[in-house]
Amino acid sequence: MNPKLNIIFSTKTNQSFISIFTKNFVKLVTITLTLIIGALSMPKALAHGDDKPGPHGGAIQMPGPFHTELVVKSDKKIEIYLLDMDWANPTTESSKVELRHSLGKRSLNAACIADKDFFVCNFPSSINLTKGQLEVKATRNNITGNLAEYSLPIKKF
């Protein structure tokens, strides 16, 4: 092959390779970022119960291998049901609940006591149920779940 043609062919091949590599690299980065953003937003998208009420008319979260249902009774009183995976069989046996209202750097804990098949949580004073969040730390049948966070205001169904 003519040396001049070989140099031209080789240069064009390298430019083609660089062009193809650059296009594929940009596609790869775009796909990777899309997957990362999707994965980070999935927990909220897959949160069980955001779209419909629980069996007692409350808001549902899934902090572990069970569900928590939060039912607001007043600005001081909240009922929390610990439900199984099918949103049924509430229990207080071998279970406990801690409830906190957080607003900025301030937080206020409620006193939670077991009733028949749910927990009654009473705050020492009225709380603003339109701002901040309610945080539930629950153990159901000796299994402790992650923190369940309910953004305020609680969705009305």
Image (cartoon, helix red, strand yellow):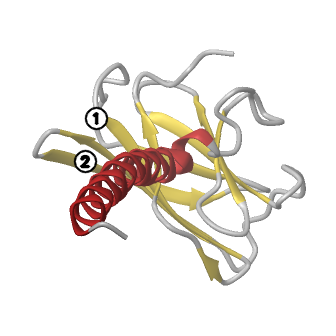
Residue 104: x and y in percent read 14, 39
The picture quadrant where one finds residue 115 is bottom right
Which is nearer the eye, 140 or 22?
22
Q: Are marks 1 and 2 in contact (CB under 8 Å)?
A: yes
The N terminus - image quarter = bottom left
Looking at the image, is mark 1 or mark 2 nearer the viewer? 2
The C terminus - image quarter = top right
**Residue bearing mark 1:** 125
Residue 62: x and y in percent read 64, 55
Residue at (30% x, 66% y) in the render: 2
Figure check: 38 above or below 59: below
Residue at (61% x, 15% y) in the render: 156
Q: Indicate the amino acid at tag 2.
A: Leu
The picture quadrant where one finds residue 13 is bottom left
Residue 112: x and y in percent read 50, 57
Which is nearer the eye, 90 or 17?
17
Gap between marks 1 and 2, in whole Å? Answer: 9 Å
Figure check: 69 above or below 116: above
Residue at (82% x, 61% y) in the render: 84
